[in-house]
């Protein structure tokens, strides 16, 4: 049984113009392409595949992944609830926080965070991003610098890094 995760690349490519999709695919590091090849082969050999939604399962299929005959939908435990503006507290938004919990890794979508933050700050200017996790290569300071270079200087204090728990722990 193989569980297909939500694919940040899938979400990104699904909305990107064709030229951007092609450029991103051309400039992916070789290790990333090997990782995708390994994932495809694992799915191809699986007897059963589960996905978080029918939409996600359909997207994998449309991308040419060889799925087995037996598939199942196992929703993620997070309901996807988004705060409506009518639910927002009056006044300042200093209590609003976005939590990132997991590896600070491209496969997990960390490369999308600066754009998401800039977009969210347009409507919730005081929201903070709390990142709990570490880079998969263990070089956390590189990904932190990369993120901070992509957010406005006045907003860098709103990116709070807590580090992660080593796998050995």
Image: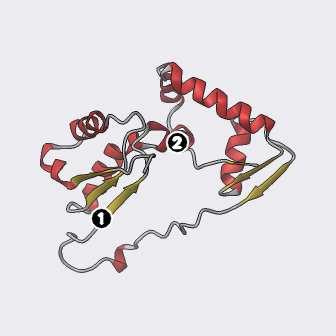
What x and y, as percent, mark residue 85?
35, 73
Q: Residue furthest right?
A: 69
Q: Residue at x 74, y 38 (%)?
A: 43
Left or right of 79, for residue 97: left
Is label 2 in a helix, a strand or a loop?
A: helix
User: Where's residue 8, x and y in %?
Assistant: 51, 44
Q: Nearer the viewer, residue 163 or 128?
A: 163
Q: Is residue 165 left or right of residue 33?
A: left
Tell me which label, 2 or 1, sits earlier in the chain.
2
Q: Compare residues 17 and 100 and report the one nearer the observer.
A: 100
Residue annotated with mark 1: 97
Q: Which residue is mark 2?
A: 15
Where is residue 18? Give x, y as percent: 54, 29
Q: Residue at x 29, y 64 (%)?
A: 97
Nearer mark to the viewer, of 2 and 1: 1
Badge 1 density bin: few <14, some 14–19, many ≥20, Cα 10 Å: some
Q: Residue at x 45, y 46 (%)?
A: 167
Q: Is residue 2 visible?
A: yes
């Amino acid at each position: 049984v193989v569980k297909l995760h939500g694919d940040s690349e899938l979400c990104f490519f699904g909305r990107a113009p064709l030229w951007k999709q092609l450029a991103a695919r051309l400039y992916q590091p070789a290790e990333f392409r090997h990782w995708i090849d390994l994932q495809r082969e694992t799915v191809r050999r699986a007897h059963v595949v589960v996905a978080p939604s029918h939409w996600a399962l359909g997207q994998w299929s449309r991308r040419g992944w060889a799925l087995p005959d037996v598939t199942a939908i196992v929703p993620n435990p997070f309901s996807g609830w988004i705060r409506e503006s009518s639910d927002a507290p009056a006044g300042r938004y200093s209590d609003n926080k976005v939590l990132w919990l997991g590896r600070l890794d491209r496969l997990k979508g960390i490369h999308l965070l600066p754009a998401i933050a800039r977009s969210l700050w347009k409507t919730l200017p005081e929201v903070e991003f709390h990142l709990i996790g570490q880079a998969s290569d263990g070089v956390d300071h590189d990904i932190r610098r990369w993120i901070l270079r992509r957010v406005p200087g006045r907003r860098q204090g709103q990116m709070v890094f807590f580090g992660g728990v080593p796998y050995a722990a």
